Image: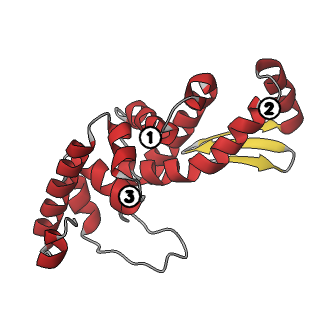
Amino acid sequence: MVRVGDGAVTVAGGDRVVQTPAPVLSRVMEVVMPTGRVEAFEAFVADAEPRLRRALTLERGAHLGRDATAEALAWAWEHWDRVQGMENPVGYLYRVGVSRSRGRRVARPAAPAVVPAPGDGVGFEPALDPALRALPARQRAAVVLVHACGWTHQEVAEALGVSRATVGTHLARGMARLRRDLGVIADPDHTARGGS
């Protein structure tokens, strides 16, 4: 999480919290980045961080998801020139976050990792989290990014480094396995129209 306010900039991820007084950070940023670039990065973070955090939290769990988000945003800061020119920077940063958190393991909490956002008013099937965790990584990523995060097939394809057709295949196979594992019978009309 990146928060600007109270005279400081706070970057939090997992167990790590870094707080820098805003005047100090502003002076450093002005030296490192020309005027206007800092504002562009701050605007990017304000827009991208919630989507990125949601996707990584759903993919990696609450603790690793926050760490992965912080790492991805730190990478974006270090490579801002490159990120700024990307067509789908959130998708790329998703890959950065996944790859940087790949080797880490955290004890699984008793509560499911997939939790609706406060105020959603939407519950979920308790067996969904273990069923998602049982999917192969690419299928799980496609299902979570499309259905839980609302990403387009193109955005997912760019994030995973595959074609849109491959995303469709992973999505169809992942949804079929989830339906089977959860005992859900697909609506024939919905399936015939190309739904998943």
Q: Using the image as rendered, state which of residue 120 and residue 63 is in the foreground.
A: 120
Q: Which residue is mark 2?
A: 36
The amino acid pointed to by label 1 is Gly
Could you tell which of marks 1 and 2 lies nearer the N-terminus? 2
Does residue 188 appear in the picture of this structure?
yes
Mark 3 residue type? Pro
Q: How is the image coloured?
A: secondary structure
Residue, disc 3: 109
Residue for point 52% across, 35% down: 72
The one nearer the camera, 101 or 15, is: 101
The quadrant in which the C terminus is found is bottom left
Residue drawn 43% across and 47% down? 56
| Residue 100 screen position, x and y as percent | 43, 31
Q: Which residue is mark 1?
A: 91
Q: Secondary structure at mark 3?
A: loop
- The residue most toward the bottom is 121
Q: Is residue 108 visible?
A: no
* Percent position of residue 132, x then y: 25, 58
Closer to the chain start, of discs 3 and 2, is: 2
Q: Nearer the viewer, residue 119 or 8?
A: 119
Drawn side of residue 8 relative to residue 56, left or right: right
Left or right, 19 with respect to 56, comes to right
- Residue at the limit of the structure toward the top, as seen here: 31
